Amino acid sequence: MVEYNIHINHLLDEDINEIIKIVEALPEWFNRDAIKEIRRDAKNMIGYVARIADTIKGFILLDERECCIEIAWLAVERSFHGRGIGSLLVKTAEDYACKRGKPVLTVKTYGGMDYQPYIKTLQFYMNKGFRLYEIINNYQPFSGQPAAILVKVLKC
């Protein structure tokens, strides 16, 4: 396996078009509505990008809540799946949460157990130490689909 020098940087406004290209190339995870929301959220949330040789290969957007930090969006370029970029971005979110004095990290994702891409997503987060808190059926932000809420208590 080829090793890469991955650099994590704060998301800048000029990075938004590059992160949108990543999600547009992942239609099994991101529909048109999600892409619009990501473009909006990238301007309003805390964001980080993973770069290899000055090219963005992944990103994470974080929503700071009263009691915790929520991973709002996370995506990695398809050809770099399984190479540690998503893990590094989650670690960055954990570090940010601890620095903000919020030792709880949450994420909501599609909670149906019938769609392979999101089964992989759930497994990814559980492999990072998240635990399934609840599955909410008919969750409106997910167009009435089930939503899985995952939680990780950090050791800050």
Image (cartoon, helix red, strand yellow):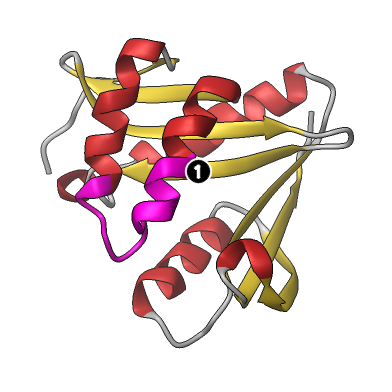
Establish if 149 lies above or below 6.
below
Establish if 151 lies above or below 18.
below
Left or right of residue 113, residue 57 in this image: left
Q: What's drawn in magenta, residue-wise?
A: 24-37
Going 88% across and 36% down the picture, which residue do you hit?
67
Left or right of residue 71, residue 4 in this image: left
Q: Position of residue 145 (x, y in %)?
A: 58, 77
Q: Quadrant of residue 93?
A: top right
Q: Quadrant of residue 75?
A: top left
The amino acid type, in three-letter code, at marker 1 is: Trp
Camera-nearest residue between 135 and 156 = 135
Q: Position of residue 29 (x, y in %)?
A: 36, 61
The quarter of the image holding the C terminus is: top right
Find the residue positioned furthest to the bottom: 114
Establish if 144 lies above or below 64.
below
Look at the image and say whether residue 9 sits in the magenta stretch. Answer: no
Camera-nearest residue between 87 and 41 = 41
Q: Quadrant of residue 150?
A: bottom right
Left or right of residue 124, residue 49 in this image: left
